Amino acid sequence: MDINKQQRLASDPFASVWVAASAGSGKTKVLTDRVLNLLLINGRPEKILCLTYTKAAAAEMSNRVNKILKQWAVCSETELVKSLENLTGEVPDSDYLTRARRLFASVLETPGGMKIMTIHGFCQTVLNRFPLEAGVPPDFDI
């Protein structure tokens, strides 16, 4: 099985997957593709949460998603079709192309933006939101 097919299978939002691989093998690409696929199937940006281990990985993934969505919004139809074919393995119809073009604006208009953060950052967010339930002072600091 070729690497692109394996990555495409792992980025399918309808599949439950575990990706474990060495540095530089494409984990961030797979997770980025998974986010893009979720957005394309009418996933609302505010309902997507991506967790990574490092701040660098979270920033890289956020940059990649935004860069691709920005490209989709302004590229030619031929380039958009090719990009979506590479992502999904299927030829997109006109509704799919329209949806892809509108995603960048949708993400920009999402209050607080997309949630792409570290596991530690997510835990801190939960603790800040529910300090009493977690048994920590409301004004705790890390």
Image (tube, rainbow, N blue to C red):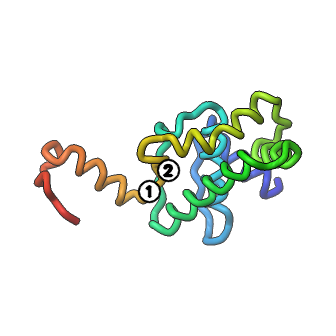
**Vertically, is 98 above or below 52?**
above
Give the camera-side residue of 49 and 82: 82
Mark 2 belongs to which amino acid? Answer: Cys
Q: Are marks 1 and 2 in contact (CB under 8 Å)?
A: yes
Q: Secondary structure at mark 2?
A: strand
26 left or right of 84? left
Residue 17 location, x and y as percent? 59, 46
Residue 123 in percent (x, y) is at 32, 53
Mark 1, residue position = 117
Q: Nearer the viewer, residue 136 or 15?
A: 136
Is the residue 61 above or below the residue 46 in the image? below
Q: Position of residue 43 (x, y in %)?
A: 57, 34
Quadrant in the picture for the C terminus: bottom left
Disc 1 element: strand
Horizontal relation, residue 128 to residue 50: left or right: left
Residue at left 24%, top 45%? 129
CA distance for labels 1 and 2: 6 Å
Dot 1 or dot 2, earlier in sequence: 2
The quadrant in which residue 29 appears is bottom right
Q: Position of residue 38 (x, y in %)?
A: 61, 39
Please state which of residues 81 and 70 is positioned toward the viewer in this rendering. Answer: 70
Amino acid under label 1? Met
User: Callout 2: few (<14), some (14-19), or many (20+) C-alpha neighbours within 10 Å?
Assistant: some
Residue lying at 81% horizontally and 29% vertically, measured from the top left? 94
Q: Is residue 1 left or right of residue 11?
A: right
Residue drawn at point x = 84 percent, y = 47 percent? 76
* Residue placed most toward the observer, 104 or 37: 104
Instruction: Kindly identify which numbered label has been placed on residue 12.
Output: none
Q: Which residue is mark 2?
A: 50
In the image, farthest residue toward the bottom: 23
Residue lying at 78% horizontally and 44% vertically, measured from the top left: 84
